[in-house]
Image (spheres, rainbow, N blue to C red):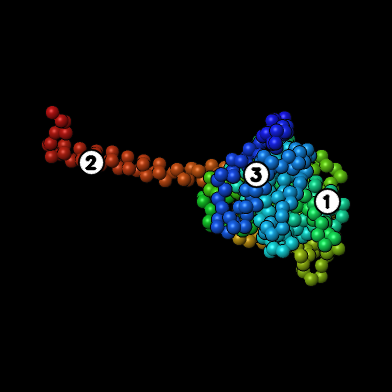
Amino acid sequence: MLLCCDMNKTELLLNAQLQAALDRLAKNQSRWPFTEFFTLCYENFISDRIAEILGFGEEILQTLNALAHNGAERIGIEEGFPVPELYVCRDPDGEYYFILPLDDVFNSKPIFSGAQKECFSALRLDGKEGLEDYVDLLTQLSGESDKEDLENEILLPWRLQALSEAPLSIVLCILGPQIEHERENFQHVFARRGIPLKNLCYSNLKMGSLERMGVQLFQTLEFMHENNCQHQDIKQTNIIIYGKNENIQAKFTDWGNAYWQALPAYRQQAIATLDYETPELRVAHAPKFRYSSKYPGIYTVKSCSTLAKHYLENMPPSKKEELDGLHIEYLKPHSANDVYALGTTLFAFKYGITPFTAPREESWAGMMACFREERWTARQALNHWRSELLKTEQDVVAPVLVFSDIRRMLTVETVAMETSEKRKEGISTVKM
């Protein structure tokens, strides 16, 4: 416990994490980069409210001091401001976050919309590097089971990270407050803002960026699989990119379909987004579609992904029978599904389309092999991407070395030729 400021001759002891957050607020307040619009809308609110939190709001400080891990508080402000609240959240490790919403979530257009989820803009006022852009993921809750699933989804990556000594390539979200609007319940979830892989263009990236992403993602996937955890929903929209070039970071997000043996009550069945689904998982999920009169081959379905459809239509009869006999087994979560999905994701990002025939290149074929027993593990894929990254780093240096070597060789050869010519002319090359 640390001693906070003297407020009206009353000393209030604050926990170390809250004191650190208040110190960051005070440090950031002098360098907030307000635009003219932002100043008009928010400057008075920020200066008044933060001043109250920093030194005058003893009641608020007492509430925040007692805030539990994974807890959140809403600090309301007067009517007339564009944004009605400031959110103070605490993550599973105890760190505080002062989040300012930049949108009225019920009257603004979201950045994007998903199933029961909409994304809005927010700002972390106490960021360690100054103001930090965040997203506010507003999730509709249909019942208590939705709330429990969402909490598990948020906490799972934190628990994974707690097992690892090194930072994992995963987005760590924090729970905000739960609110009610028009008799419906919603949950705020906050995360550092990045760019979904789907919104990036491969041709705009510097050489080596894709390889760095491959190393980061498969390194994390290997750690997850070693701890009996599968993501089960890897795709371009569920990989968030931070930074660029040599500092690029790729991180997994959206853990709603994840399986972890340490959480046996959470999710037990294998699942994947359709375009990233393995052939065996497609067979297991669609037994009534396995024999379709609409297509010439069996084991094909109308909604099947292009590559899985190709595999299933061209599969030998003996293998088809084998898949049919094991379709119950394939309903269980398996690490091979993640490797296939991540390989498909990186392929689609690089070439702009998901594969529709069996890849010829050994690396892609290893990650997206038709049969599970022939598919690479996360470690094998990681070793491949490490090797590819090393090649790109050598390619950057190689032209300089080659040019230097050629220049040196040409210089030596030129001197030798000139010396030989002078000797023929009888001119001494020795300086007196």
Residue that mark 1 sits on:
147
Mark nearer the viewer, 2 or 3: 3
Q: Nearer the viewer, residue 254 or 180?
A: 180
Q: Earlier in the sequence, mark 3 or mark 1?
A: 3
Q: Is residue 71 left or right of residue 406?
A: right
Q: CA distance from mark 2 to mark 1?
A: 83 Å
Q: Quadrant of residue 274?
A: bottom right
Asked whether the viewer can see residue 177, the reply is yes
Q: Earlier in the sequence, mark 2 or mark 3?
A: 3
Q: Which mark is residue 72?
A: none
Residue that mark 3 sits on:
51
Q: Nearer the viewer, residue 300 or 39?
A: 39
Residue that mark 2 sits on:
417
Residue at 53% from the left image edge and 53% from the top image edge:
205
Residue at 13% from the left image edge and 39% from the top image edge:
425
Q: Position of residue 144 (x, y in %)?
A: 87, 52
Q: Nearer the viewer, residue 395 or 273?
A: 273
Element type at mark 1 = helix
Mark nearer the viewer, 2 or 1: 1
Q: CA distance from mark 3 to mark 1?
A: 34 Å
Residue at 87% from the left image edge and 55% from the top image edge:
143
- Is 130 placed above or below 321 here? above
Say what amino acid the circle numbered 1 marks.
Lys
Say what amino acid the circle numbered 3 marks.
Ala
Element type at mark 3 = helix
Q: Residue furthest top?
A: 432
Q: Position of residue 259 (x, y in %)?
A: 79, 46
Indicate the quadrant containing the N terminus: top left, top right, bottom left or bottom right.
top right
Q: Is residue 418 left or right of residue 12?
A: left
Indicate the quadrant containing the C terminus: top left, top right, bottom left or bottom right.
top left
